[in-house]
Image: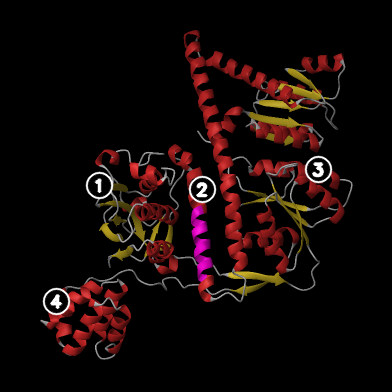
Amino acid sequence: MTQNQIEENKGNILIVDDTPENLQVLSATLADRGYKVRGVINGKMAIRAARSGSPDLILLDIKMPEMDGYEVCTQLKEDPKTSEIPVIFISALDEVLDKLTAFQVGGVDYVTKPFHVAEVLARIEHQLTIQRLKKQLLNRNKELQEEIIERKKAEEAAAAASLAKSQFVANMSHELRTPLNAILGFTQVMSRDSLLSHENLENLRIINRSGQHLLELINDVLDLSKIEAGIIGLDERSFDLYQLLDTLEEMFQIKAETKQLQLRFSVEVNVPQYIKTDEKKLRVCLINLLGNAMKFTHDGGRIWLRVSVESNQPPPGESASHHNSPSVEPLLILFEVEDTGIGIATAEIDTLFDAFVQTQAGRKAADGTGLGLTITKKYVQIMGGDIWVKSVLGEGSSFKFNIRVFAAISSEITVATLQRVIGLEADQPVYRILAVDDNQENRLLLVKMLQPIGFEVREAENGYQAVELWESWQPHLIWLDTRMPVMDGFEAVRQIRAKEKPTQWRTVIIALTASTFEEKKGEIIAAGCDDFVRKPFQEQILFDKMACYLGVRYLYQELPRLPVGALRRYCVNEKPDSFFGGLLAQMPQSWVQELYDAANDVNEELAIQLVDRIWESHPTLAEALKDLLADYRLDKIMDLTQSSLK
């Protein structure tokens, strides 16, 4: 059960009060407890909302302009559509006559202001419980009452367990995403340094891409419950498969070199370069499998990633007309990750894909959560395929999975125009920006992102300091963290909004949240924020938000981008020995001997020089040999030249 489902089960509450502060306090409090809340400010709006929305309960103020609460309740009780909705009056009126009138017009309860939150929650739950029992009595006979009570207890226990799990995951999400925000943010800040060498810029890009993938993995773990509930679907888009493989090899190559592993990617020539499927899920699957292979393969071992077309027929029971492009049949592409690692015991293979289950080797490594293979299998199934494994203990493992894809063309690949904000256009005010975050690294990140552009930036480490700085400095915009000690972001924005009312000044406040469950957009907006951004964020998102809310105009620098398809190809057409035999027979024996010696000595640079020497005179042979060199097949070159010399 997801957090959203828990909230929907709690009940829909309509709050009627002409004082916005009361609406905000009650809305935030009830939303935090799992209720779905709607607020209106007068009687006419209340009647319309009750007729259209059918709330489970109404909290109704008495003293309001135009139509008081008594008249509102009277009209609600006269309408068959709304007559059964329980109404709890919340009012500062404390006379006995006022309470009697409230019950006479149809109210079921009465709460006197100022109220205690616990009292309001208890009375709401009491009335909702009465309503539920009425419905049960209408739909169930006496023989089923005991069964209903037991089922209700089980649901409450499951909801409590699910809520506890969600709270734990939300806290873990916050702890993971907060440092990751600094990692990704500072790679963007450092990439602005014009003195950085090309190599260091490439290193920063690798760090950023790896961090982005880590963020995706965090999100995937948080979404595991949604996967199990079957509410995560397939996000099919056209993309460049070779580019994906290129990024993966770049990501793993440094670690492979550190462990002295031979890492090889091989793609058969009939695998299309441009395909349509869920790129993110495919990427997660490959990284999970390659990461495991790296982890459990000893130094000096070998890892292969092979890609081939398994079939161009639709899976049983399906047809091509099921897809958005009915004229094109799907392909089944097979991915295989093979290693020479420690292997998996036969007894452990049956539970290998179960959640939170690790092999004996995984437990010894004390690394990972046991979710990687579980997520991989579920993603493969979502993409229309299956996964299986073969392994021999002490010799290595081979994981294979196939997925259903559709061939695409390069024109379908969307490549965004890359540009970077480098300053502010002339003739603009000096914008004052307040960065509020209890994490020093995150505050520093905002300062380093915004100050060089031309913004005036100040910092606060909690909500209390933020309110004080707002009063003395009057910032144009506040980037506000929601979880902080002393005073959190929600309370800070409420106090700022309250202090703004007598003035003409209104500050734009945008929340920054590292959580995925606990801070929801409705709660953030209800507290008084104009918008929110989730951590980790890209700097462009911050600049876009400030342009939207403040009208800021920027100066941009266009960035070079890699054209679609302009990548090293992984496909090596494995030509037969007879192809090389005829061409090598035409070459001088001295040149063949030199090439053999270079391959035998593992002298790749010399081999490249020898091939370059014949490029103009023998281009066909040179191109084929270059393919072998690109695939690190010096062993193949040695065998071919040795046969030719004989």
Residue under numbered circle 1: 393
Q: Amino acid at mark 1?
A: Leu
Residue under numbered circle 2: 219
Quarter of the image where one finds residue 247: bottom left
Is label 1 in a helix, a strand or a loop? loop
Q: Amino acid at mark 4?
A: Ser
Compared to residue 187, the image places residue 582 above or below, namely below
Residue 203 magenta: yes
Whether residue 492 is visible here, answered yes or no, is yes
Work out how far the residue at label 3 is from the one at label 1, CA to CA, in angstroms.
Answer: 64 Å
Residue toward you, 57 or 476: 476
Q: Which mark is residue 578?
A: 4
Please say if the residues under marks 3 and 2 sit with CB atoms less than 8 Å apart: no
Circle nearer the N terminus (4, 3): 3
Q: Residue at x 51, y 48 (%)?
A: 219
Circle nearer the N terminus (4, 1): 1
Q: Residue at x 86, y 14 (%)?
A: 97
Q: Badge 4, how many Cα within 10 Å: few under 14, some, many 20+? A: few
Quadrant containing the C terminus in the rendered view: bottom left
Q: Is residue 474 left or right of residue 261?
A: right
Specify the segment rendered in magenta: 202-214
Q: Which mark is residue 495?
A: 3
